[in-house]
Image (cartoon, rainbow, N blue to C red):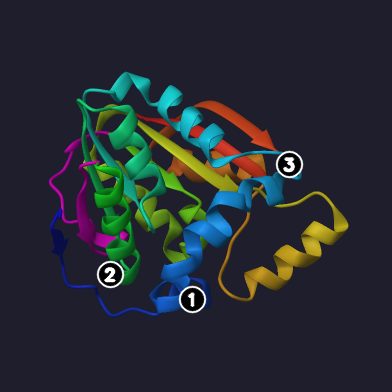
Amino acid sequence: MNPILSHPIPHRRRTAAQKSNFNPLTALVYEDVWRKRSLSILSRKPFPLQQELDLLRSWLSECKEGVLLDVGCSTGVYARGLASGFPAAKITAVDMSELMVKQALKRADREGVKVEWVVADAISLPFEGEAFDGICMGGTLNELGPDTQVILEECGRVLKKDGLFFMMFLLSSEKPLGRLLQRFLSLGGLRFWTTLEAESLFSRAGFEQVRFEHYGVVAFSLLRKH
């Protein structure tokens, strides 16, 4: 079994959305009940997890023999997908919830993929500067709350110059019902952006958006560090 490297989690105010990741039931059911179906539900079209992983590997193919980091990995969907698709790469995955990381480790061991699992807060990543060729983040951006900008800058710190950052996140809805639901979800700390707001957010953190696709509110961005 791959070991888990644990670092102290700083005490800071957390949103309800962030706190939910420390719930044992959330960690247990997250991937099978929600994550495998989430993009189909949110985009209102068939969008299987395999299609998402194919997109991840395609857009990060430049890094297929490099050192990659999955930030806010939850149960390790992206990290495991990269490990199976890029056998020559070194994959590290980090999440602040030890419960989530333990579930990720169990799944990786069942699948026979090698990932370095780390428990740490993304606001202060325990890695040297410019340690990674590529980074990915699957859905976590919307959950970062008031620390979004700081965490994006921290990701930039550990990414090499010209390194790639693949991200899946949710845009603000243009439909009345969607806007109403997102206003409710924002009470729990989730944030949503227009395409222009997201691009500005990335630019302020030192990234250039080089590729973008969206399916309803489900967005994919490929960023390159300046």
Residue for point 69% across, 37% down: 215
Image position, residue 13 (x, y; %): 40, 80
Q: Quadrant of residue 133?
A: top left
Question: Is 150 contained in the magenta span?
Answer: no
Dot 3 or dot 2, earlier in sequence: 2
Residue for point 42% across, 63% down: 147
Image position, residue 2 (x, y; %): 15, 53
Vertical side of 14 occupied by 101: above or below: above
Query: Could one spot residue 182 in this view of the protein?
Result: yes
Identify the residue under disc 2: 98
Identify the residue under disc 1: 15
For disc 1, the neighbor class at 10 Å (few under 14, some 14 to 19, many from 20) is some
Vertical side of 217 occupied by 225: above or below: above
Q: CA distance from mark 3 to mark 2?
A: 32 Å
Marks 3, 2: nearer the viewer? 2
Q: CA distance from mark 3 to mark 1?
A: 26 Å
Marks 2, 1: nearer the viewer? 2
Dot 3 or dot 1, earlier in sequence: 1
> What SS does tag 2 mark?
helix
Q: Is residue 199 left or right of residue 68?
A: right
Identify the residue under disc 3: 216
Q: Which residues are magenta?
A: 113-133
Q: Which amino acid does the dot numbered 1 rest on?
A: Thr
Vertical side of 170 occupied by 195: above or below: above
Q: Quadrant of residue 88?
A: top left
Q: Is residue 207 left or right of residue 156?
A: right
Query: Could one spot residue 14 in this view of the protein?
Result: no
Dot 2 or dot 1, earlier in sequence: 1
> What SS does tag 1 mark?
loop
Nearest to the observer: residue 142 or residue 59: 59
Q: Residue furthest top?
A: 62
Residue for point 47% across, 40% down: 167
